[in-house]
Image: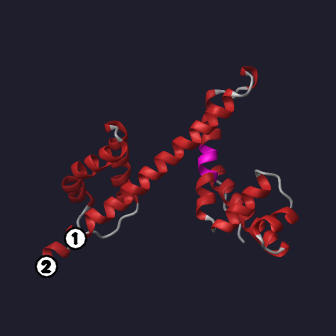
């Protein structure tokens, strides 16, 4: 491999060389040219905001991984949006939030989903069992086979993540652990 192929490519060079290829990969995966264009744009925007050195040997594998992640994020967001709209459909029109409130609620749901995905699985599961399903500590210990102290620790960790998320959404400084 020559030294030239090991030199990091600029985002402009990456875009010029790989945008068309990435768009085609995304279009095959998603089946929609507009979604593919949006995600290809998002991929290169990420490279601009979070640069990393890529050469000809590492660019395609990296962009492929990024494309898989962006597709998963899109599908997950659409799943959350579908569930939100389904929930709204079961409530009287008089109780329906405004379009702005609905958009804000959807963004918050997506943010909470992202927060839960970043937590260790048992912490997230403990939090969901408590906050969504209404189980108490004893019920969670029985369901998950963990101690009461572990339940409390998991819930504390999840609540701290919620506080940090809320601070980020509000533009306030994040609380410390």
- Determine whether 161 is above or below 85 in the image: below
State which region is magenta: 107-112
Residue at 30%, 65% in the rendered image: 61
Give the farthest residue toward the top: 94
Earlier in the chain: of badge 1 and badge 2, it is 2
Counting from the top left corner in percent of width and height, residue 70 is at: 42, 52
- Determine whether 118 is above or below 166 in the image: below
Mark 1, residue position: 57
Residue at 70%, 66% in the rendered image: 123
Location of residue 68 by image quarter:
bottom left
Camera-nearest residue between 41 and 32: 32
Q: Secondary structure at mark 1?
A: helix
Counting from the top left corner in percent of width and height, residue 26 is at: 32, 48
- Mark 1 vs 2: CB contact within 8 A: yes
Q: Residues within 10 Å of mark 1 (few under 14, many from 20)?
A: few
Residue at 78%, 64% in the rendered image: 143
Q: Is residue 149 magenta?
A: no
The rendered magenta stretch, by its main secondary structure, is classed as helix
Q: Is residue 111 magenta?
A: yes
Check residue 96 in the rendering and tell me which mark sits there, or answer none.
none
Location of residue 153 by image quarter:
bottom right
Q: Quadrant of the C terminus?
A: bottom right
Check residue 1 in the rendering and tell me which mark sits there, or answer none.
2
Residue at 33%, 54% in the rendered image: 44
């Amino acid at each position: 491999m020559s030294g030239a192929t090991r030199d990091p490519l600029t985002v402009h060079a990456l875009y010029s060389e790989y945008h068309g290829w990435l768009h085609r990969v995304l279009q095959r995966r998603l089946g929609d040219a507009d979604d593919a264009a949006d995600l290809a744009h998002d991929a290169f925007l990420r490279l601009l905001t979070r640069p990393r050195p890529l050469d000809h040997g590492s660019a395609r594998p990296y962009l492929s991984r990024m494309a898989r992640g962006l597709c998963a994020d899109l599908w997950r967001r659409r799943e959350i949006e579908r569930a939100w709209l389904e929930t709204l459909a079961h409530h009287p029109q008089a109780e329906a939030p405004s379009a702005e409130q609905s958009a804000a609620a959807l963004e918050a749901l997506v943010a909470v989903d992202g927060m839960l995905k970043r937590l260790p699985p048992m912490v997230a599961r403990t939090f969901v069992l408590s906050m969504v399903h209404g189980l108490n500590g004893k019920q969670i210990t029985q369901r998950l086979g963990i101690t009461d102290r572990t339940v409390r620790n998991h819930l504390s960790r999840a609540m701290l993540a919620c506080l940090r998320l809320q601070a980020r959404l509000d533009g306030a400084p994040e609380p410390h652990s």
